[in-house]
Every structure is written in C-alpha cells, then in structure tokens.
Amino acid sequence: MNCQLCQKELEAYREGELPEGIMIQVKAHLGDCQDCAEMNQLFILSEKVIQEEKNLQSNPFLVTRIMAGIEEMAQGYESYQPVSIFQKVLKSALITVSLAAAILFGVVAGNLYKPLTTVNKIPAEMAYLNDAALESVDLLTN
C-alpha cells in the first residue's frame, strides 16, 4: 500500500469502517511508514482536542458582562452631542490668531534687545569693499 492510499483511508480506519483486508494493509503500512503513523497520531490528537472543547462549560456571567458593556457603549453614544461647524471654525481661527500673536511677540521682543547705539554705523573697511567691483580687470593685465 502506498502513502497516498493509506492517508485517504485513515479516517475510515480509525472509525473501523474498512473491510478486513484493507484494514490489515493500512495497519501494516502504519507500522512501516513513519510519516503516515505521525499523520494518524495527529488526527487522533486533533479529535481528542475537539472532543475536549465540546465538553467545556461556558461561563454564564460572560454574556451578562458583554451585554452590560454594549448597553454602556450605547448610552455613551446617546449622550454624545456633535460639535457644530461654527465651533470647529472658531477653534481653528483662535489657534491661528494665537500662533500669529506669539510670533509677533517674539519678533518684537527680539528687536527690543538690539542696542540702539550701533544701528547705522558702518566700519571704514566696509565702505571700500565694493570699490574692487568698479575697477576693470583689463587695466590690471597690462
């Protein structure tokens, strides 16, 4: 018997629904083939897990807690009042105006710190800096 045929007949083998000759062949193959034997063990283990889950008792208070949570959320939605468009616009306008006022205050405060004695004084060296741009380069090459 090959593995494909054995794996096809595993469920019927476990339930005892196979004819005697095929049952003996599947049993012999499971004794010889490690992969098919492991697959059979996995099927048996999964059936045990499913049976144990069927026998579990549910918590009767779970439904009560879930329903109470749903009702609490529904009451929260009923008490919710949507914000009007006027309030949204007013809020964004106030934020914009306050940011502009903060920037203006920072500029004014920075200008107040500047000393008034050195506002229009230019050093003598700075006055001659642009004279080089007025001279022709051709005069210097001759």
Image: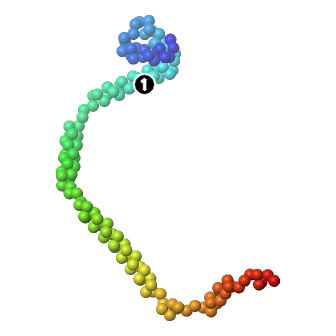
Q: Amino acid at mark 1?
A: Leu
Name the residue located 41 percent from the left edge and 83 percent from the top edge. Answer: 109
Q: Position of residue 89 (x, y in %)?
A: 29, 65
Frontmost residue, 124 versus 52: 124
Residue 43 position by quadrant: top left
The residue lying furthest to the right in this view is 142
Report x, y in % for residue 14.
Answer: 38, 16
Q: Is 36 in front, or is 129?
A: 129
Examine the image and state in which quarter residue 9 appears.
top left
Quadrant of residue 127 in the image? bottom right
Query: Could you tell me residue 131's position as x and y percent?
Result: 67, 87
Residue drawn at x 48%, y 12% as measured from the top left: 28
Which residue is at a point 33% across and 73% down the rendered structure image? 97
Residue at numbered disc 1: 42
Please name whichever residue, 109 or 34, is drawn nearer the observer in this view of the structure: 109
Of the 4 image quadrants, the one containing the C terminus is bottom right
Compared to 110, does 40 lie above or below? above
